[in-house]
Image (tube, grey):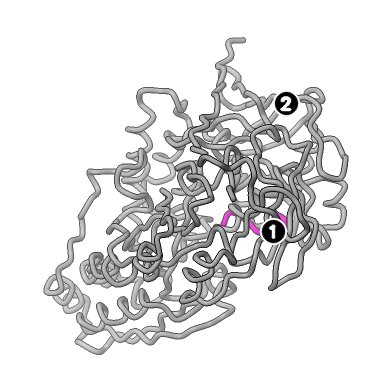
Amino acid sequence: MRRTKWVAAAAALTLALTGCAAGATGADGTGPTLRWAVTLPAHWDPVVSGSGAQFRILSLAYASLTEINEKGEAVPSLASSWDYNAKGDQVTFHLRPNLKFSDGEPLNAAAVKAYLERAKTQKDSALFGDLTSIKSVNAGSDTDVVIDLTQVDYQIPLLLGERVAQITSPKAAQDPKKLDQSPVGAGPFVVTENVPGSHVHLKKNPDYWDAANIHIDRVELLAAPEEATIVSGVQTGVYDLANLTPSQVKAAQAAGLDVVQQPGFNASNVSINVNKKPFDDPRVVDAVRFAVNRQEFVDKVTFGYGESTDQPFPAGYLAYDPQSANRYPYDVAKAKQLLAEAGYQPGAIKVDLVIPAQSTAAEIVQAQLGAIGVTATIKVDPNWATPFFAKDLALSLYGTTGRESPVQTLTAHFGPNGPLNLSTPYQPAGFQAAVAKARQTPLNSPDYQANLRAATRAGLESRALVFTYSQPNLFVKSKKVSALTPIPGQIHWTGLTVGS
């Protein structure tokens, strides 16, 4: 049987600052320590946490089957290589030998099988919808993970990266509730102390497969303070690294700190439920599309650091479809005309805009809809996720951090069971066939990008989402922390150093 080999070498482009050997010391006198101000994870079990932005933090404790490089391509991690059968409906991942979890248990094919099966079946799994292409997982040997697929799908090496396949110890997973607060993985660090709402301490894992390239002995995760105090906290040495809001960028630069604009797959949208009035009328949805002034989001939400987008991908990304750009330009008169054609007089449409927390973006949407005669009442629901994922809302806002697999991003937004599709089970005509063709195209095929863009184009026929803006992931760091490798949406810990 002819087999296609997918083997890649990870790029190591992180630049170390001079004089880092001495390093900063942790509270217990250990060697180089990174103090990171961040929103602490509510869940430490990746099966429960899902593919949200906190996977970046979980990557301290867990390793995944694959990673991505600067181009978004799948590269080895726990799996040193992988290959497909000739038909493309089976893929075998070859694990590195002698891997083990921080509890001493072997990280072998059986452990990967246990993780993927748990992610597919555990009642509170946030990942089951991402694994529909996986029919069965078997251990071909101690180091060979054989995955049989429900369809031809060459996206699997991308899919099983940090967002979906951060492998947990099967022994620890026997008590899922304990694992959710006390992670046991095979990542570069091991959690030694977890005080919810306060801090998490981690130490270097000597058994990590790439431990030779981990130059930090300790990481201290500290609960993020008020936005206004982030810059002073880094400036005075309380923190070495912190997530940064666009409103604080100029203050950080004025303080002489490093502002990092990490590339990402972020995209925000207005989520619409076409199964509920008045959005069951396509003319009303089109009116919303024409009412959106994307530049206002860029100016007022991202302070100019973002870009407008009408797709779930930033411009320039391989899945971004230039043919679909600017199909619905900002046009208030056109929006009003469409509402009139649908039989709605100004002020006749009143709808709740339900969001998890007050935001500038919600106020912009409210004002822009008001300009075309639609009254949107902002309602803040801290438990917003429950009605959103139950598809009970008519109008909401959402933002995605993207996925390593662009096809996974498309199905999450536009598929009939997509978690980000507020209009489930609705999907646009032609999307299923287009996305299947993209799945069936090998990643090194000359047709891959064209088929991927065609799937994006088909997805954008959906009336369930109106995309607004994208922005990079912003961090502020002290100059003693070396450069972050520009991996889209991720932080890679290999090569990173912390100086004196």
Amino acid, disc 1: Val
Please name whichever residue, 229 or 322, is drawn nearer the observer in this view of the structure: 229
What residue is shown at x 31% (from left), y 46% (from top)? 457
Q: Residue furthest bottom?
A: 347
Count of all numbered marks drawn on residues in the image: 2
Q: Check whether the beta carbons of the residues at disc 2 and disc 1 lie within 8 A of each other.
A: no
Choose top left, top right, bottom left or bottom right for residue 283: bottom left
**Which residue was labeled with disc 1?**
48
Quick check: 257 above or below 264?
A: below
Which sits in the foreground, 270 or 90? 270
Q: Is residue 401 above or below residue 235?
A: above
Q: Residue furthest left?
A: 333
What residue is shown at x 62% (from left), y 24% (from top)? 82
Q: Which residue is mark 2?
A: 96
Mark 1, residues whose alpha carbon is within 10 Å: few (<14), some, or many (≥20)?
some
In the picture, measured across the screen, residue 105 lies left or right of residue 489, that is right
Q: Which span is picked out in magenta?
A: 44-52
Q: Residues within 10 Å of mark 2 (few under 14, many from 20)?
A: some
For the residue labelled by badge 1, is the local secondary structure a helix, a strand or a loop?
helix
Residue 337's disc is: none
Position of residue 204 measured from the top left corner of the image (x, y, whole percent)? 74, 45
Q: Position of residue 180 (x, y in %)?
A: 76, 60
Residue 219 sits in quarter:
bottom right
Q: Earlier in the sequence, mark 2 or mark 1?
A: 1
Identify the element where label 2 is drawn. loop
Compare residues 79 and 467 and report the one nearer the observer. 79
**Tag 2: amino acid:** Arg
State the residue at coordinates (73%, 29%).
145
Residue 327: x and y, percent? Answer: 20, 55
State yes or no: residue 133 in magenta: no
Q: Residue furthest top?
A: 1
Q: Position of residue 404 (x, y in %)?
A: 51, 43
